[in-house]
Amino acid sequence: MFQLLQTDVSSAARRGRLTLAHGVVDTPCFMAVGTQGTVKCMTPHEMRELGAQILLSNTYHLNLRPGIEIIRGAGGLHRFMGWDGPILTDSGGFQVFSLAKLRKLTDEGVHFQSHIDGAACFLGPREVVAIQHALGPDIAMVLDECPHYPCDRETACKAVERSLAWAARCKEEAAKTGFRGKLFGIVQGGVYGDLRRRCAEELVRIGFDGCAIGGLSVGEPDEELFRIAEETAPLLPATQARYVMGVGTPRQLVELVARGVDMFDCALPTRVGRNGTAFTRRGTQSARLAAWKDDPRPVEEGCGCYCCRNYSRAYVRHLFNAEEILGLRLLTWHNLHVYLQLMRDIRAAIADGSFESFRREFVANYRVNNPEGKTT
Amino acid sequence: MFQLLQTDVSSAARRGRLTLAHGVVDTPCFMAVGTQGTVKCMTPHEMRELGAQILLSNTYHLNLRPGIEIIRGAGGLHRFMGWDGPILTDSGGFQVFSLAKLRKLTDEGVHFQSHIDGAACFLGPREVVAIQHALGPDIAMVLDECPHYPCDRETACKAVERSLAWAARCKEEAAKTGFRGKLFGIVQGGVYGDLRRRCAEELVRIGFDGCAIGGLSVGEPDEELFRIAEETAPLLPATQARYVMGVGTPRQLVELVARGVDMFDCALPTRVGRNGTAFTRRGTQSARLAAWKDDPRPVEEGCGCYCCRNYSRAYVRHLFNAEEILGLRLLTWHNLHVYLQLMRDIRAAIADGSFESFRREFVANYRVNNPEGKTT
């Protein structure tokens, strides 16, 4: 399923290829987030035009609305949402911990109330696999316990043990239900290196098609994020894809690729775009800047995306001021292009042996600012 | 500029062609409304794909935001919004009467407060022509006084005289400023046939490139709308295009074409689409219907639009329930297609002499229901 094509000489960066039921994905890859069965503001055809090879969708959300019966009836998530390329679905675990109300955690799973209507729900390993089986993704994720940050050692340790038990159960359930996609494990362990090691080694022993490094992007500083990835990635099989969930800014992606990560997903480019902020190769810029009001230049000079080929900053700013949906569309489009083009550039740099200088230059040029109260 | 190609044998329906600075428009035509320099939810490229030949934009809105200096600086409205086909701009008169606060009407024009920030503004014939000159549309409209419905005879009479004086002033101003587009007059006169006649005849005497029948779709019943159009259209030159502003539903369009009207604009398909209602050839349907929840069929069976070719009712309903922007996009797309396809079908029916049976069948099949509290 994963073919390791090349390892960078001066970093842990890798270039590879995932061969999945619905197509091939070149890695390192960025997966745009289609939480509710649509990448917000975009059509699947536009995602193809952007060069997206794989999308992510959210088990928690789709299970609550429209519900798996409807998606199963439509012939699975691919047909329901009109995307015929690869899809990865998360397990829903992260959303249960971040969105749901009145959670009650047991060894069997999580009892919680829907954030939509308060309905009582339960997600355990069996449910998570059954739901994903109905959705029919190319890659499914195991259920894990994702503690908040900061998290004391004892809590992190318990989360690791519970996540391992659930991971093993998910693998059994996947075999039982006849799920035909790939199944990824998730490494927990908080900031504790030995717990991360214990979790990674045990997941490798159980045996999955790939592994995620989970529990990141939950408020930890960049140094912790980078350290955990750097320590954990080598514990995972070199012949399998490594996935950091829910991360991150363009700068974080470059730094994590350098530490041996192959797959990413993040809502930032779409969410930040809808809020009127453009990602560029040199940092973020607000479309509401007064300086844009009569600026004839594209959002990012030199950018080849649909937005930048056709519209001026003045027009994009006007659309946001006038609260026009086309504004949300154009910055979403541009931001996704920036992320997907970044991954293409990263792959090309690894391929021609220039990744280390690419990384140095990219990080030096990237202006740290603050689209949503976080370091970018 | 207008070529009358054919007149229907059994009704007053006509088929024609407008040749404008930015292209050719086949009539009868429907102009999608791009109030703030964008057809809501749509790109200009998508409008092309839909077969739109002309768009409408709103002088009142663009003048307040972003302001004409910015659009002039961008090289005019076509370049600002990225649409290289014909554009018609209204005069702003209708919005002054419907949106602005604290209007004060004099023979010179209208003093009013911006509905956005309360700023004091003035629109007279000179201003309306200067603004449209800066926007650079293919067709500009004269300033008119558009009274509310119902409207007594004296008010209607005064509005006619003031509108005529303004129309003449607009023509002079257009010559003075060197406006190179076409200029249309607007017939007022309320429900009073003799006032409509007086207004139409005087506009013809002044001489315009075409004429609108204004002051409609302000609350009058269909019978009044149809009667006024039927009485007024023949008073306008057969060799010029006739335009009914701000109308209407598919059924109203068919009935007005039968009365000799060539051009229409209306916000209904886009607005109703964003509200979750689909126009079909047989009436409207709400995307929120429970019956749609697992319906694999397209929004309208047999429809060739992007939405219907690619997505199910179940998916569209899910998008609206989940408040996803793609839902607004898809129904906007579908509704605009229904309108533009209807005009293509009307033109084909006139061309092959079957318009009268087309009309009878269309009206008989069109289910009257209520997308926004009005008869459709």
Image (cartoon, coloured by chain):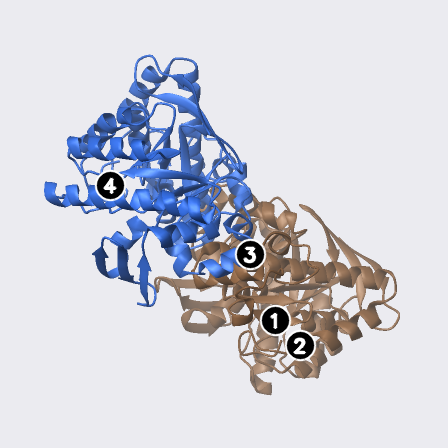
Chain colours: A blue, B brown
Identify the residue position indicated by label 3 in the image. Answer: A74
Chain of the residue displaying label 3? A
| Distance (Cα) linking label 4 and label 2 | 55 Å
Q: Nearer the viewer, mark 4 or mark 2?
A: 4
In this orientation, which residue lies closer to the viewer: B177 or A187? A187
| Marks 1/4 same chain | no
Res A168 visible: yes
The residue tagged with tag 4: helix, strand or loop?
loop
Inspect the image, locate mark 4, and give the three-letter code of the amino acid beneath it. Answer: Gly
| Distance (Cα) linking label 1 and label 3 | 24 Å
In this orientation, which residue lies closer to the viewer: B231 or B362? B362
* Local crowd size for mark 4, using a 10 Å CA cut-off: few (<14), some (14–19), many (≥20): many
Q: Percent x, y for residue A33?
A: 40, 44
The residue tagged with tag 3: helix, strand or loop?
loop
Q: In this view, does A157 lie to the left or right of B256?
A: left
**N-terminal label among 4 and 3:** 3
Inspect the image, locate mark 1, and give the three-letter code of the amino acid beneath it. Answer: Thr
**N-terminal label among 2 and 1:** 1
| Distance (Cα) linking label 1 and label 4 | 48 Å
Inspect the image, locate mark 2, and give the three-letter code of the amino acid beneath it. Answer: Arg
| Distance (Cα) linking label 3 and label 2 | 29 Å
Residue B367, disc: 2
